[in-house]
Image (spheres, grey):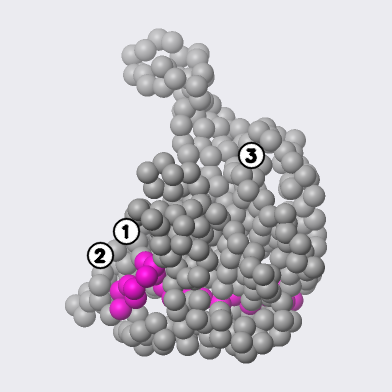
């Protein structure tokens, strides 16, 4: 895989350099120019709001080595999950509470939405198991699917498929999946919701923003599993815990929540739920002339439309997290009235938050 990986990285570097010739950059900081693609394993985190055409274009530009989906694809949106399963990129996913929105238990008469989604994803659904990447010194461990925060959500689904009936059993399943990871590997735990114990203010990484006074909405089983692994001395490299569920944009216009926490022991907790992660709107200059009929005669005016899509990118080098970056890619479509042909212009906006982390534990 080493030669294939190097070839792919060479192509990625060439594509990135070439892209600068036609990217209209909204803002370009050192986080973009300092990418050392030839030495990095790049992971991309996505939460919800998936569009096959637009997001595939973005993935083709970013060229990640692995895409991690934190769930909440839609209210049991089987077709959308099927389109993700057909992606030509390496990927792993965990289903969220919205992916089991209508199904409290598996149907004995016909395949329900949850069953169909699990069939679509197949081995790419990582709940309660581990996938190792030896050459990259990387192991991905799956947490509990369908998590809602707090109590055990969709207990009957968890019991029927995974034998999980309570938090203790769930914590044990996560622990058992992670304990066999090679000692020199970076362990990344992929869950739908984050662990408890990371704060109870509304803007904390798993804080309740929809109730007065806040509260901790983290998962007790995930926190217990991580604690047990640390007590066992499992993590020779500080782990990375990736999840979604808790939206970046707080309820009632309360601003934004903390999306990353680096603990005293250098464990990194990363919330990938940049919600909303898609913004589609008309440019200010085109407002007032965005709708027209075939009978209109003014056909020379361009009508630009912009779509911006957010991604969380993790750069891993030699089994350690080098950098975590939130990137926003913009696609502007310009269409002349009365004509079907569209001209696309792609733009990239620098990160809204950026965290540098090195093996010495420094943060910024």
Per the image, the residue denoted by label 3 is: 349
Q: Is residue 29 magenta?
A: no
Splitting the image into 4 quarters, where does residue 100 fall?
bottom left
Residue depicted at 34% across the width and 75% down the height: 152
Q: Is residue 183 above or below residue 217?
A: below
Compared with 245, 106 (above or below) is below
At which x and y percent is residue 281? 46, 32
Name which residue lies at 43% across and 10% down. Answer: 298
Q: Is residue 137 magenta?
A: yes
Q: Which residue is mark 1?
A: 75
| CA distance separating discs 2 and 3 | 37 Å
Residue 89 visible to the viewer:
no
| Dot 1 and dot 2 residues touching (CB under 8 Å) | yes
Residue 344 on image: x %, y %:
58, 33
Q: Which residues are magenta?
A: 135-155
Q: Main secondary structure of the magenta part?
A: loop
Mark 2 secondary-structure assignment: loop
Give the image quarter of residue 102. bottom left
Q: How dense is the environment of label 3, judged by Cα within 10 Å: few (below 14), some, or many (20 and up)?
A: many
Q: Quadrant of the C terminus?
A: bottom right
Pointer 1 or 2: first along the chain: 1
Nearer to us in this view, 237 or 138: 237
């Amino acid at each position: 895989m080493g030669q294939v990986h190097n070839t792919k990285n060479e192509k990625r570097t060439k594509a990135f350099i070439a892209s600068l010739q036609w990217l209209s950059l909204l803002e370009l900081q050192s986080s973009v120019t300092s990418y050392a693609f030839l030495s990095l394993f790049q992971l991309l985190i996505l939460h919800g709001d998936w569009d096959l055409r637009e997001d595939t274009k973005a993935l083709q530009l970013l060229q990640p080595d692995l895409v991690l989906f934190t769930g909440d694809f839609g209210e049991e949106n089987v077709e959308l999950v099927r389109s993700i399963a057909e992606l030509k990129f390496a990927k792993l996913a965990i289903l969220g509470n919205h992916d089991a929105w209508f199904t409290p238990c598996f149907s004995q008469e016909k395949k329900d939405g949850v069953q169909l989604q699990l069939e679509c994803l197949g081995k790419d659904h990582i709940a309660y198991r581990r996938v190792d990447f030896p050459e990259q010194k990387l192991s991905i461990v799956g947490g509990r699917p369908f998590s809602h925060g707090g109590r055990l959500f969709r207990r009957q689904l968890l019991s029927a498929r995974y034998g999980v009936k309570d938090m203790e059993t769930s914590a044990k399943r996560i622990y058992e999946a992670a304990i066999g990871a090679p000692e020199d590997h970076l362990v990344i735990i992929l869950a739908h919701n984050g662990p408890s114990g990371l704060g109870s203010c509304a803007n904390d990484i798993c804080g309740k923003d929809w109730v007065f006074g806040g509260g901790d909405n983290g998962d007790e089983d995930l926190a217990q599993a991580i604690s047990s692994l640390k007590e066992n001395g499992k993590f020779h490299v500080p782990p990375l815990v990736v999840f979604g569920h808790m939206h970046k944009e707080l309820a009632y216009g309360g601003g934004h929540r903390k999306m990353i926490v680096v603990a005293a022991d250098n464990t990194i907790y990363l919330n990938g739920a940049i919600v909303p992660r898609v913004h589609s709107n008309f440019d200010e200059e085109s407002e007032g002339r965005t709708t027209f009929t075939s009978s209109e005669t003014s056909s020379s005016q361009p009508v630009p439309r912009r779509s911006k899509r957010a991604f969380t990118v993790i750069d891993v080098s030699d089994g350690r997290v080098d950098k975590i970056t939130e990137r926003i890619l913009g696609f502007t479509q310009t269409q002349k009235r009365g004509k079907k042909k569209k001209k696309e212009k792609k733009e990239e906006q620098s990160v809204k938050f950026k965290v540098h982390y090195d093996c010495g534990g420094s943060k910024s």
